[in-house]
Image: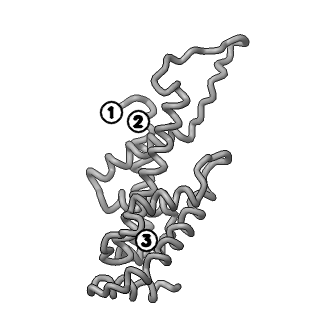
Amino acid sequence: MDDSELAALFARLEQGDATAMDDLLPIVYDELHRIAVRKMATERVGHTLQPTALVNEAWLRLGGDQQPLWKNRGHFFSAAAEAMRRILIDQARRKQADRRGGGLEHVRFDRTGVDLADVDESDEELLLLNDALEELAAVDPRRAELVKQRYFVGLTYDEVADLSGLSLRTVKRDWEYARAWLHDRIDRLRRGQA
């Protein structure tokens, strides 16, 4: 289904057409799956979350078969971006807690002078990104939403521009600004600076 047909379904839904939701549900689920496959393709090797698991969890967080009335594609993708972000962050936090013994005391096994505990920097980096992104959202919600849509959902510049109603040039400029802002903030968080 192309964007115009999807937009027409959202328009029917907005006008109160009860059958529009039945027509929309399979398409929305398929779109979420496509996004999840694209997002998971960029994750590190050995990532335990599979695209189908990500889309199923996002689908449930968005309401499952009892989807709310989406105002438009932008409303849906904004909610999907937030759901996928929270799922990935929750998983990273769980893995870090498990890695650290889930609250148990960490004991080093150090026969050769090397700590054999498996440390996955990717989860730590994802959590730093999340912290920085929450700070960005407090001062610049539009750019934070752009990061969620580009990074966590994997939307292209064109898709973000279309959904947000911004020009492609503005989206690219906002993306560069947000990346630089987040990079600076993450560097400070790594150094323990507030």
Residue 61, position as x, y percentages in the image: 40, 58
Q: Estimate how packed mark 3 is, as few (under 14), some (14 to 19) or many (20 or more) residues with alpha carbons within 10 Å.
A: many
The amino acid at mark 3 is: Val
The image position of residue 3, as x and y in percent, is: 47, 84
Whether the residues at callouts 3 and 2 have beta carbons within 8 Å, the answer is no
Q: Residues within 10 Å of mark 1 (few under 14, many from 20)?
A: few
- Answer whether residue 129 is visible to the viewer in this image: yes
Please state the total of marks drawn on the protein image: 3
Quarter placement of the C terminus: top left
Does 95 appear above or below 179? Answer: above
Q: Amino acid at mark 1?
A: Ala
Separation of disc 3 and disc 1 at Cα? 31 Å
How far apart are labels 3 and 2 at the CA level? 28 Å
- Give the residue number, with chain letter if any, for mark 3: 160
Q: Nearer the viewer, mark 3 or mark 2?
A: 3
Q: Position of residue 135 (x, y in %)?
A: 32, 46
Amino acid type for the residue under numbered disc 2: Arg
Disc 1 element? loop
Task: List the residue tagged with mark 2.
Answer: 188
Residue toward you, 80 or 121: 80
Whether the residues at callouts 1 and 2 have beta carbons within 8 Å, the answer is yes
Residue at position x 38%, y 49% in the image: 133
Which class describes the residues within 10 Å of circle 2: few (<14), some (14-19), or many (20+)?
few
Q: CA distance from mark 1 to mark 2?
A: 7 Å
Picture disc at residue 194: 1
Closer to us: 109 or 22: 22
Image depth: mark 3 or mark 1 in front: 3
Point 60% across, 63% down: residue: 37
Vertical placement of 178 versus 116: above or below? below
